[in-house]
Amino acid sequence: MRPSRTAAVLLFAYAVVMLWVTLGPAPGAVSGNQAPGGVLDPSIWFDSDTWTIGSQTEFELNVLLFVPFGALLAFAVRGAPAIVPAVMSAGFALLIEVAQIPMADRISDPRDLVANSLGAVIGILIARISDAIASIPARLTARRRAAFAREATRTSPIRTTSTAPIRTATGGIRLTADDRAGTRAPAGRSIR
C-alpha cells in the first residue's frame, strides 16, 4: 500500500494538539524526578526515583497519548519499514522532553519518554495489523483470479485465434495472427 495523504494531514493536526498538551500551560501540579538536564542527564536514567516517582495513571496516559500518533505516522509513511515510524516517533517524544527542560511547570522525565515511545510502537503495530487485515480480500481475489485463469486455459476447448481468414466489409481479406506469421496461407492465395 502507498503512503496516505489523509493520514499525513491528520498526523500534522494531531502533532499540533500534542505539542499544545505537552508544552502548553500545565493545568495542575506535575510530579516526577526532574534533574537539571532532564532526559539529557545520564544520571537521571539510573536514579531509582526516576522509575518510582510519578503516578501509574500518568504513565498510562502518556502511552495513550502516543498511540494515535504512532498509528497515523505508520499510515503516513506506509510502505517504509516499521523501524522508520518507530524512530521518528521516539525522536518526536525526545524533542518534546528536551523542550520541557527549561519550563518551570513541566518535567523532562525519562519515564515520559519511555511511555511515549511505547505508545507510538503500539500505534504502529495497530496500523500494520489493520493494513494486513485490510489487504487480505485483495490478495485472495488476486489469487482466485489467477487460479481461474490457469484453469480456464488448461480446460478451454475454444481457441483464442481463428484459423480462417476474415472477409472485411470492403471485400478484402484480413489475415489472422496465424496467417501473418506465415503458418497458414489464406484460402486461394499463396505465401510469398
Image: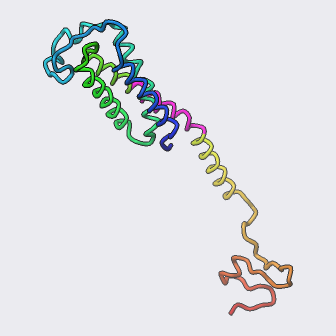
Q: Which of 27 and 176 is in front in this view?
A: 27
Q: Quadrant of residue 28?
A: top left
Residue 76 against residue 191 in the figure, above or below: above
Residue name at image x 33 percent, y 24 percent: 117
Picture coordinates of residue 37 (x, y %)? 17, 21
Residue name at image x 39 percent, y 14 percent: 61
Picture coordinates of residue 141 (x, y %)? 63, 43
Q: Give the range drawn in magenta.
A: 121-137
In the drawing, does residue 65 fall left or right of residue 190?
left
* Magenta span contains residue 131: yes
Picture coordinates of residue 30 (x, y %)? 30, 8
* Magenta span contains residue 33: no
Q: Which of 75 and 169 is in front in this view?
A: 75
Residue name at image x 42 percent, y 27 percent: 16
Q: In which quarter of the image is residue 168?
A: bottom right
Q: Quadrant of residue 17?
A: top left
Chief secondary structure of the magenta portion: helix
Residue name at image x 67 percent, y 84 percent: 182
